[in-house]
Image (spheres, rainbow, N blue to C red):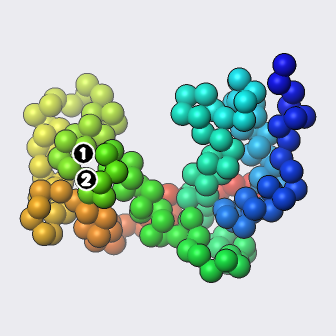
Amino acid sequence: MGSRASTLLREEEIEEIKKETGFSHSQITRLYSRFTSLDKGENGALREDQVNFRGFMRTLAHFRPVEDNEKNKNVSNTEPLNSRTNKLHFAFQLYDLDRDDKISRDELLQVLRMMVGVNISDEQLGSIADRTIQEADANGDGCISFTEFMKVLEKVDVEQKMSIRFLH
């Protein structure tokens, strides 16, 4: 008989999450309320991937608008989770399925298949993957490194495209 009251956030946890993510106290408590409504097992995690609230907040923090960094100065001097580099690293990890710090043709194909389903033929997907790697692979190893990924996206407004406005 899990009780919602037994899973309430402590004030020190809220402060730690504020420092780590840049979210305000009210944003954290509002998001916690939404998180607990998704926590059907009332075990403090989202059942499918066992994502706990802190991990959930760290993921969401990547999508805070960059200008929020000015309002919420990070006293720990670490790069904020919503910085351009961290946003790009987050996106890179979505493609780097085996976590070897490079995106292979096979990984790119797997992600493309997940995104488009059966709407594009395997031949077309292969062509997209080959062209993508050809354009991004600066050192000729047949994969895309994080540095190459950043270079390809240097003119893209990642800060705007990977931002969600959260209510204050």
Residue that appears at 57% across and 57% down = 63
Give the alpha-carbon distance from disc 2 to disc 1, as whole Å.
7 Å
Q: Quadrant of the N terminus?
A: top right
Residue 138: x and y in percent read 15, 69
**On the image, which quarter does residue 90 sit in?**
bottom left
Mark 2 surroundings within 10 Å by alpha-carbon count, few (fewer than 14), some (14 through 19), many (20 or more): many
Q: Nearer the viewer, residue 96 or 155?
A: 96
Sequence-wise first label, 2 or 1: 2
Residue that appears at 11% across and 43% down = 127
Q: Are marks 2 and 1 in contact (CB under 8 Å)?
A: yes
Left/right of residue 64 with respect to residue 98 in the rendered view: right
- Spot the residue most to the top: 1
Residue 3: x and y in percent read 87, 27
Residue 62: x and y in percent read 55, 59
Q: Quadrant of the C terminus?
A: bottom right
Q: Which residue is mark 1?
A: 108
Q: Nearer the viewer, residue 163 or 21?
A: 21
Badge 2 amino acid: Ile
Badge 1 amino acid: Leu
Residue that appears at 13% across and 40% down = 126
Q: Which residue is mark 2?
A: 103
Residue that appears at 25% across and 53% down = 103
